[in-house]
Image (tube, rainbow, N blue to C red):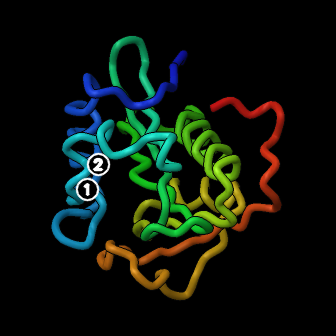
Amino acid sequence: MSYTIEESRPEWDAAICRIIKDIGAEYGAVGEGFGPSDAEVAAMSQHYARETKSLYLIARVGDEVVGGGGVASFQGSDEVCELRKLFLLPESRGLGIGKDLAQRCLAFAELAGYRSCYLDTLAGMAGAIALYEKLGFRHLERPLDGTLHGGCDVWMLKEFQGNEPEATTQL
């Protein structure tokens, strides 16, 4: 399946909002303490900008938005970012789209000067956790102080080896 990945634009906000909320509901991530309930979900393109060391990417198959993922500072930190709202429609999973989105976000984060990347998720999202482990995330015993997602039960961190991104990585 052929797909494209691009930076989020306002015309895709409604589609990615629906995907984030629907997939969140699929895994029980509903209400306070879960990412799909964050205010930014209603208009993702307005909350991420390269100038603020943040990026949200949209994956499309043809004209259909099938998912997205982003990265931004964790609680205003210049050193720790957070991999955020990486969600894909069920028919788009297992095709490498999630890995591509995550790798592009991580390459951007490293280039932006972050030293590590945090994420929180749910134990039921086994496929996502396996991907994060393959990408070098390690499990934490508890969330980082200041996390907004108290409903999550899996916390992970990836340390960047340096601030030199791979030359072949495209954002």
Q: Give the answer, above or below, for where 63 lies relative to 83.
A: above
Q: Residue at x 20, y 55 (%)?
A: 39
Q: Secondary structure at mark 1?
A: helix
Indicate the position of residue 15 as horizontal and vertical percent values.
Answer: 24, 31
Q: Residue at x 25, y 73 (%)?
A: 33
Q: Is residue 165 left or right of residue 171?
A: right
Mark 1, other Cα within 10 Å: few <14 / some 14–19 / many ≥20 = many
Nearest the viewer among 78 and 6 is 78
Q: Is residue 166 left or right of residue 89?
A: right
Q: Which mark is residue 85?
A: none
Indicate the position of residue 128 as horizontal and vertical percent values.
Answer: 51, 55
Nearest the viewer among 137 and 106 is 106
Compute the Cα span from label 1 to label 2: 9 Å
Q: Amino acid at mark 1?
A: Pro
Q: Amino acid at mark 2?
A: Ile
Q: Which mark is residue 36?
A: 1
Q: Specify the farthest residue to the top.
A: 62
Q: Is residue 135 left or right of residue 2?
A: right
Indicate the position of residue 58 as horizontal and vertical percent values.
Answer: 42, 31
**Mark before the other along the chain sequence, 1 or 2:** 2
Q: Give the answer, above or below, for where 56 lies relative to 21.
A: above
The residue at which mark 2 appears reads as 23
Q: Residue at x 45, y 85 (%)?
A: 145
**Is the C terminus in the top left, top right, bottom left or bottom right quadrant?**
top right
Nearest the viewer among 167 and 34 is 167
Question: Are the residues tagged 1 and 2 within 8 Å (C-beta)?
Answer: yes
